[in-house]
Image (cartoon, helix red, strand yellow):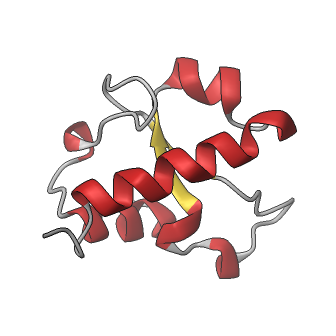
Amino acid sequence: MKRHTAIYMGYFGFQIAEDCICEICGSVAVDIHHIKARGMGGDSKKDVIENLQALCRNCHNQYGDVPQYKEMLLQRHLSFMRLWGKGKK
């Protein structure tokens, strides 16, 4: 399992990848997307939960690396973290 996937799953308490849902449409997520791209070769400093978002393939293709959607993805992710993350009430 990739490091960023393990970070995401651990934060939300998911046991298997199939537990992850797309934070945009609610279907099964297949990708853990870096909201702020790591760049070529990767940047482990961006492997933090605030920058990792589960997306289905369709949403990843539609929104993932499109600059005009970056702020929307970030806001949706922060809301998802408040509702489902470790800090939830």
Q: Is residue 33 visible?
A: no
Which residue lies at the image location 74% right of the left edge and 74% below the top edge?
Answer: 43
Q: Is residue 58 visible?
A: yes
Question: Residue 84's image quarter?
Answer: bottom left
The answer to whether residue 23 is above or below residue 62 is below
Residue 3 x, y percent position in the rendering: 48, 70
Residue 83 x, y percent position in the rendering: 26, 55
The answer to whether residue 59 is above or below residue 85 is above
Q: How many marks?
A: 0
Q: Split into 4 quadrants, where in the image is the N terminus?
A: bottom left
Residue 2 x, y percent position in the rendering: 47, 62
Front one among 49 and 68: 68
User: In screen coordinates, is 25 left or right of 68?
Assistant: left
The answer to whether residue 27 is above or below residue 30 is above
Which residue lies at the image location 74% right of the left edge and 45% below the top edge?
Answer: 70
Question: Residue 44's image quarter?
Answer: bottom right
User: In screen coordinates, is 25 left or right of 10?
Assistant: right
Question: Residue 6's image quarter?
Answer: bottom left
Which residue lies at the image location 25% right of the left edge and 62% below the top edge?
Answer: 12
